[in-house]
Image: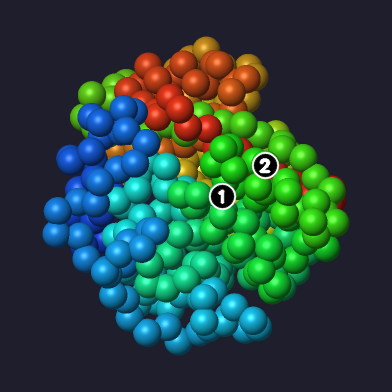
Amino acid sequence: MVGPSAESLRSHCGVTPPPPKPSPPWTRWLRMNVPAAARSRNQARPPGARGPKVEGGEGRGTRSSQRSEGKSARAMRFLSEDELKVVEEVLASHLPRSLQVYGYVFQKNRVTSEPMDVIVDRWPDFSAILCRPRVHTKGDLFKDICVFAKDDGPLRGLLGEDGIINWEQFLCLGADSSHEETVMGVAAERGASGKRVALCHMLFLKDPSHLPTADRSPLRMSSLDESNVDLVNETWKFGNGERSVQMIRNMIRHFPSCCLWDERGCVVAWILTYPSGAMGMLYTVPEHRGKGYAKLLISTMSRRLHSQGYPVYCFVEEENQLSYRIFRNLGFTEDPAYRAAWFEFHHL
């Protein structure tokens, strides 16, 4: 069987992201800052950047249509659609460490999927920002909360504010690992028992032009569809039965995915995109490993996302050295001083 051409591979990555405006913040940051990303903990604001800054400044934002309630109503703020566009620019000046929250905001500004709130500790010059899914069903609990902050003080205030996080139910929270003491401290104060469940490298790709092109193969490439939800859920390390099905279905329905089918019509390898824009859930069935399928999927997905101006990045657990080597060999780099961590509270 004659396999797909390079052109057809580029057109079979699942949900096609709507093209953003020319030169989005991620692309500009790549041109300006990537060579220095691993050497500098604090990225300078790009020339001509507008709007508010993290940790104070003279920036101005638009008026929000929503405000948080309670004693800190003048400080905590639920961001409007217009303000999210401003925040995207601000977060770009703190890449790569802001990349996960940046990815959530980037997707929210372009893709209509399940609802999510973005909250800052103050406006316009915020110091901490949090993305949280709206919880309507038990399946919504499995979706991550994600935070970015330059300092522990503002983060502690945001996490501990009444009405921001429900510490009495299951939740999974992603953050810079340097904030672990703060996260666990606030949880303890709220009576939430939990632990760190993952510590990951955050790898990002500057230039996909050197990625290997697809060789002729007997396999067919396409996107996943909702009939594949159970397969992905059963093979995902963090899959949790029916509780994680809704999240995976949402990912397949709204975000890009790639998969390979063998001659018998069975899916043998796949990769998805998280709501944060990160590539993930990469998997090859055991009998097809060692054939280069993971590299093919990563390369195809990376080109697709990059061509649309989207961030191209992923998280790899520290103990998963095989995946780490694959991404590094494909040209992905990292800030060696940064690790992303996930924490779970109230086991499901």
* Residue situated in front as seen by the camera: 186 or 286: 186
How far across and how far down the image is residue 162, in percent? Answer: 70, 72
Looking at the image, residue 332 sits to the left or right of residue 25; the answer is right
* Residue situated in front as seen by the camera: 330 or 58: 58
Q: Residue furthest left?
A: 48
Asked whether residue 33 is in view, the answer is: yes
Asked whether residue 283 is in view, the answer is: no
User: Which amino acid is tagged 2?
Assistant: Glu
In what quadrant of the picture does the N terminus appear? top left
Residue under numbered circle 2: 181
Answer with mark 1 or mark 2, whichever residue precedes in sequence. 1
Give the SS element for disc 1: helix
Looking at the image, residue 4 sits to the left or right of residue 253; the answer is left
Q: Relative to 151, say whether 136 is above or below.
A: below
Give the SS element for disc 2: helix
Instruction: Write the residue at 43% across / 25% down.
Output: 336
Mark 1 surroundings within 10 Å by alpha-carbon count, few (fewer than 14), some (14 through 19), many (20 or more): some
Looking at the image, residue 237 sits to the left or right of residue 260; the answer is right
Instruction: Write the residue at 56% across / 50% down.
Output: 152
Q: Residue furthest top?
A: 290
Instruction: Write the residue at 54% across / 58% down.
Output: 154
- Residue 37: mark in rendering: none
* Residue situated in front as seen by the camera: 250 or 30: 30
Compute the Cα span from label 1 to label 2: 9 Å
How far across and how far down the image is residue 347, in percent? Answer: 84, 48
Looking at the image, residue 2 sits to the left or right of residue 50; the answer is right
Mark 2 surroundings within 10 Å by alpha-carbon count, few (fewer than 14), some (14 through 19), many (20 or more): few
User: Which amino acid is tagged 1?
Assistant: Asp
Residue under numbered circle 1: 152
Q: Are marks 1 and 2 in contact (CB under 8 Å)?
A: yes
